[in-house]
Amino acid sequence: MNLLRTATMIVALTLIGRLLGFVRTLYVSNLYGTGMEADAYFLALTIPMTLFMIIPGAINAVLIPTMRGVLEDGNKERVSNLYHKMLAVIAVGFFLLTALGMLFSPQIASMYGLVGEKADITIRQLYLMWPSVFFIGIAGLWASVLNSHQHFFTPTLGSVANSVIVIIGMVALVPLSGVDGLSIATTLGYVAALLVMIPTMRKFGYNQRFNWHLRDDEDMKSMGERVVPIMIGSIISQTTIFLERGLTTGLGDGKVAALSYANQIAQLPMAIFVGAFTLPLFPLLANYVKRNEMHLMKATLQKGLSYLLILLLPVTVGFVLYGEPVIRLLFVRDAGAFGDTAVVWTFTGLVFYGVGLYFLAARDLITRAFYALENTRTPVIIGAIGIGVYLLSAYLFIPPLGHGGVALSASISAMAQAGLLFLMLWKAVGKLLDKAFLLTLIKVVISCAVMSAAAYGLNSMLSTVTPVIQLLVGVSISILVYFAALYACKEPLIHEIVGKYLKRFKK
């Protein structure tokens, strides 16, 4: 399966999953808006959501290079033993983590500075969501194993199953259990994401049993040495989420929920495009490094960074142009709890999150390049520096910008980390980018300017139609104008994509 085809499949499934995720968010916003219950739910959701971003990626980073090497050797028994040992470690480890999390849920709530009824609601949501952590750990292992076999469909399908079950669970349980139904449904969604992969795991010949013969196993030792710094680096990279919750809680009720809604919109393109390129590119980067084909590794990395630039920079501009009407279309209902104040708060967060989109994506992709080089120390150091940048930015920008300063600080931290990682990788392997990347950047900026001018003109022309029609027509034509401008600028990556799809269409 080639890169473009794999990326297209991942984009399609991720888009479906995220759109369904929006249905879930719309349900929550319509019921609770930016009220106390919404804050409590999103505070509790931080735990599984953060681990969902950390754990699968960390397992992926250590397991894929090792398993790819074992698979290429053709030793099926060694592959099976490696999986059973990983299953034993992860199952027991995450069971203990779940138990400890439930035990210390009151202390976690107090760390957010919560008291009274809001604290009680948050603690209850934590109790209900901690079991999802166990299922996230197993799902991360299974997804990494399947990715090692160059199979990306089923793990990505898990996000769709997750969203479907969460929606069904919320609709069924919230009338009976109130806000507790949201958390129960969330946990059931992670169970569904795991269950979807069972048939494919059986197809590849993996059965579920433990192997505790860990001593003197070179593969496990090698992965153990790498997983600790990767986990530390991943935790550091996600620390801003917990800092964000703590900083925003002190700014008044509703701000946590507003940033959560804004972040979910911002994460939609991140999940679609970063997942589409990071997942299939990482095994490629690891293979090139193992074969010492560094020129191919660097060319692949540049191509990934160029694609992300083409896709994400116009999204940042689009958040400014269309963010407020999108929020109104998604969240505002006549009888709902999401009012004009919530729209303004959410739009503010969305704009400032949007500033850092490309840099977040570049940071994650360059980090994968370091993992392919089996250098796990550098991302940890840069991640720690990123936390310092975040705290300094928050100190400077929260007083004038409020919760917008919290979102802007996350973007500034991502910029700093991406820039430092890029410089360190350049130092390690030599020149990473050539003039083609600079030309792509110039063409993307020009095309974004053309798109913005077209959007302003369209807004004037469509001022008399309904907001929904204005938004749908405006966004659709703006996207077409952007890609037409890139095509007119003779951007080779766009011509390559168009050429491949035209060739496939003719066939």
Image (cartoon, rainbow, N blue to C red):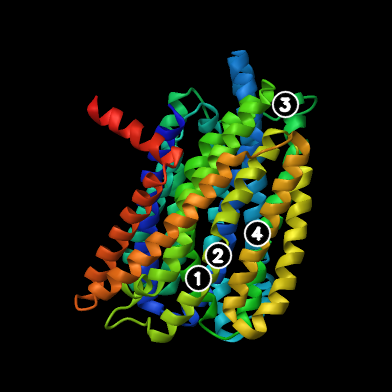
Instruction: Say which quadrant the N terminus sits in.
Output: top left
Tell me which numbered mark, 4 or 2, is placed earlier along the sequence: 2
Label 2 packing within 10 angstroms: few (<14), some (14-19), many (20+): many
Dot 1 and dot 2 residues touching (CB under 8 Å) = yes
Residue that mark 4 sits on: 415
Residue that mark 2 sits on: 355
Task: Give the CA separation, mark 4 to mark 2.
Answer: 9 Å
Q: Amino acid at mark 2?
A: Val
Dot 3 and dot 1 residues touching (CB under 8 Å) = no
Task: Give the CA separation, mark 1 to mark 4.
Answer: 15 Å
- Specify whether 424 is left or right of 280: right
Q: Nearer the viewer, residue 98 or 376?
A: 376
Tell me which numbered mark, 1 or 4, is placed earlier along the sequence: 1
- Specify whether 496 is left or right of 67: left
Circle 2: element type: loop
Mark 3 or 4: the one toward you: 4
Residue that mark 3 sits on: 219
Specify the quadrant of the image occupied by residue 197: top left
Q: Amino acid at mark 4?
A: Met
Dot 1 and dot 4 residues touching (CB under 8 Å) = no
